[in-house]
Amino acid sequence: MAKIIIEGGNKLSGSVKVGGAKNAALPIMAGAILSEGPVVLSNIPHLNDVETMEKVLSALGITCKKLGPGTIELSSHSGISEEAPYELVKTMRASFFVMGPLLGRLKKARIPLPGGCAIGVRPVDIHLKGFEMLGARVSLDAGCAVATADKLVGAPIMLDFPSVGATENLMMAAVYAEGTTVINNAAREPEIVDLGNFLNSMGAKVSGAGTPSVTIEGVKSLTGTNYSIISDRIEAGTFLALGSLFEGPISVENCNPDSLHAVTAKLQEMGTDLKIEDSKIIVRGPTRIKPIEIKTLPFPGFPTDLQAQFTAALCLSEGASLITETVFENRFMHVSELIRMGAKLNIRDRTVVINGVDKLIGAPVMATDLRAGAAMVIAGLVAEGITEIGNVHHIDRGYDNFVDRLKGLGAKITRQEQDNHA
């Protein structure tokens, strides 16, 4: 098990390039199951979750070939299996994305119920109800979700909640359904738009992606394509949260500011100076950030995936801040770790009250999940003394080459691989 060691309190400045979006890459990789020709994907981030998805696809019979840094070719020349292996699916919730395309192409799928970060229940009921609306027979058997259909028929689907995963899974299942499917109360995230654009590049007929109503006209077949993944708005937001704590300037490059309006609005409330250009945002932090209130919401609201990072930053605000988490019910596990560093935090139901302190003190802490891990890195970089972060495999799931990129900004940060036999 590795750990990250940070000597905090050093000035950070410079530029950092945002990589491809993990949350766009994973469903798009799964969507390659639908294609009858080779799919070449570029701007793929080098992450543990991407490697896990490659293993899942390989186990299903998809050939995965690396063509170069950030570029892979996915093709299904031989038969595709309808069953994903439990050993892989249990480690990553996004493995469940293969169910929609498998059901669409094979009219059958058997997928173990998923794992991933322990940040809440995140049931897959919404996905399964949608498959039933398309004409599939759905059941649970030995810990697996099973769906079969003689054929899929387009239908109006109303989601109980604008679930990103359910919207994406149903879009992929509906591509081969007869007639028209309309997904109402659909998620609006930029990653939904990217998936729709990818499917259309193969010959699908998807319209309305990024709006509350997505329409899919069924087609008979899809061809191969070359497609580049969008940049990662959550990674961009993480670097922007970090930049709010330093005079900088820190230039966050290769990002899409249009996908970050809720984030940049809060940064401006905090007193940061932002220069927003076409594909980069330059941030300069104030002498001390101002306290604010945040409520996480589905897009275009403030992203739940940036809640932990902003909690860490606001620990140093001048006054009391409130962050309310409305998306996941168990996403404050980083709070106890920040308290170990001298933060003054209290949880009241689904709101954390942050009373700003003058400084944080380095301490041994844990990355309790992916985004909490990024929050601990932010806290360590601004704290006095040494911070050691354990469980960094969580961080590896969402941030490519995180340590070296932070070094490029002037951080004194190292990664140590620990001997499991020690």
Image: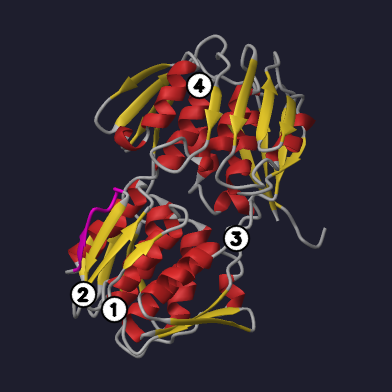
- Three-letter code for the amino acid on which mark 1 is drawn: Val
For residue 179, which numbered disc appears in the image?
A: 2
Tag 3 or tag 1, which sits nearer the N-term? 3
Residue 223, percent across and down? 19, 75
The residue singled out by tag 3 in the image is: 116
Image-based side of 22 in relation to 379, left or right: left
Check disc 4 and report its element: helix, strand or loop: loop
Please say whether residue 408 is visible from this viewpoint: no
Image position of 137 with respect to 400: above or below = below
Considering depth in this image, is 417 or 203 the residue closer to the camera?
203
Which residue lies under the disc numbered 1? 153
**C-alpha span from label 3 to label 2:** 35 Å
Q: Position of residue 60 (x, y in %)?
A: 44, 82
Please give the residue where the numbered disc 4 appears in the rendered image.
Answer: 244
Q: Which amino acid does the dot numbered 4 rest on?
A: Ser
Mark 1 vs 2, N-terminal side: 1
Cα distance, mark 4 to mark 3? 30 Å
Q: Nearer the viewer, residue 365 or 96?
A: 96
Q: CA distance from mark 2 to mark 4?
A: 50 Å
- Secondary structure mostly seen in magenta is loop
Q: Amino acid at mark 3?
A: Gly
Of the two numbered discs 3 and 2 in the rendering, the one whose residue sits closer to the viewer: 2
